[in-house]
Amino acid sequence: MERIISGDERALLENMLDRNREALIDSVVRLSDAASRSRRVPSATTPIGLLRHSAAAERFWFQHILDGRSKEDCSGPATPGEASFAVPDGRSLDDVVDEFRSASAQSREIVSAYDMSDTFQNSHGADVSVRWLLLHMIEEIARHAGHADILVEIITAEAAPT
């Protein structure tokens, strides 16, 4: 992923979001499929679950909220709550990475049709701008990339020979 450090606001924000998306993927794919499902915290959070949850957040914000699709018309689950961390047994890590990449690609396509100052209503009925949405998603994905880094470090350390 090319790192853009100068340019217009949109290019910088979109690049930062893409870099955070890739950082999340890069953290999780260091694990095996089985290890990516390891829980090390009391919540349902797992490395693979962070990818699945992030895909749901992409669909919720870009497909449902910004593009106005019903949740049923989104390309997959679009409710980024606790349940969005669950990964069915039949879904591999590669499947979930592909799901996240697909949701991110659709987000890029949707947002490209809007100006940064265009506004829409968020899930609480407040008017927000596309600029806000990009910043919100940078924060969301960066936070989960950090969670993934920590979980992967713990899982990898536990598996290392002593």
Image: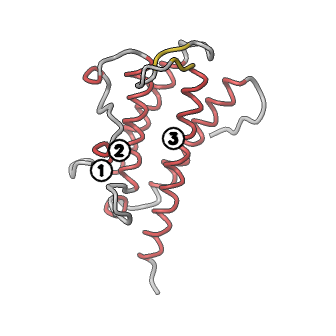
Q: Amino acid at mark 1?
A: Ser
Crowdedness near tag 3: few (<14), some (14–19) or many (≥20) residues, C-alpha within 10 Å: some
Q: Regarding mark 1 in the picture, which secondary structure is present there?
A: loop
The quadrant holding residue 13 is top right
Tell me which residue sits at (48%, 18%) in the image.
Answer: 110
Closest to the camera, between mark 3 and mark 1, is 3
Question: Marks 1 and 2, how far apart in space?
Answer: 6 Å
Indicate which disc, 3 or 1, sits on the residue closer to the N terminus.
1
The quadrant holding residue 8 is top right
Q: Regarding mark 3 in the picture, which secondary structure is present there?
A: helix
Q: Is residue 88 left or right of residue 126?
A: left
Tell me which residue sits at (42%, 61%) in the image.
Answer: 31
Looking at the image, how many numbered discs can be counted on the residues?
A: 3
Tell me which residue sits at (37%, 56%) in the image.
Answer: 46
Closest to the camera, between mark 2 and mark 3, is 3
Q: Is residue 5 left or right of residue 56?
A: right
Residue 92: image tag: 1
Q: Is residue 67 left or right of residue 73?
A: right
Q: Which residue is labeled 3 in the image?
A: 140
Where does the image place residue 39, in percent across and percent down from the top left?
34, 63
Q: Is residue 14 above or below residue 91?
A: above
Q: Is residue 43 above or below residue 153?
A: above
Viewer-proximal residue among 143 and 18: 143
Where does the image place residue 29, in percent across and percent down from the top left?
45, 54
Question: Marks 3 and 1, how far apart in space?
Answer: 23 Å
Task: Check if mark 1's residue and mark 2's residue have beta carbons within 8 Å.
Answer: yes
Q: Amino acid at mark 3?
A: Glu
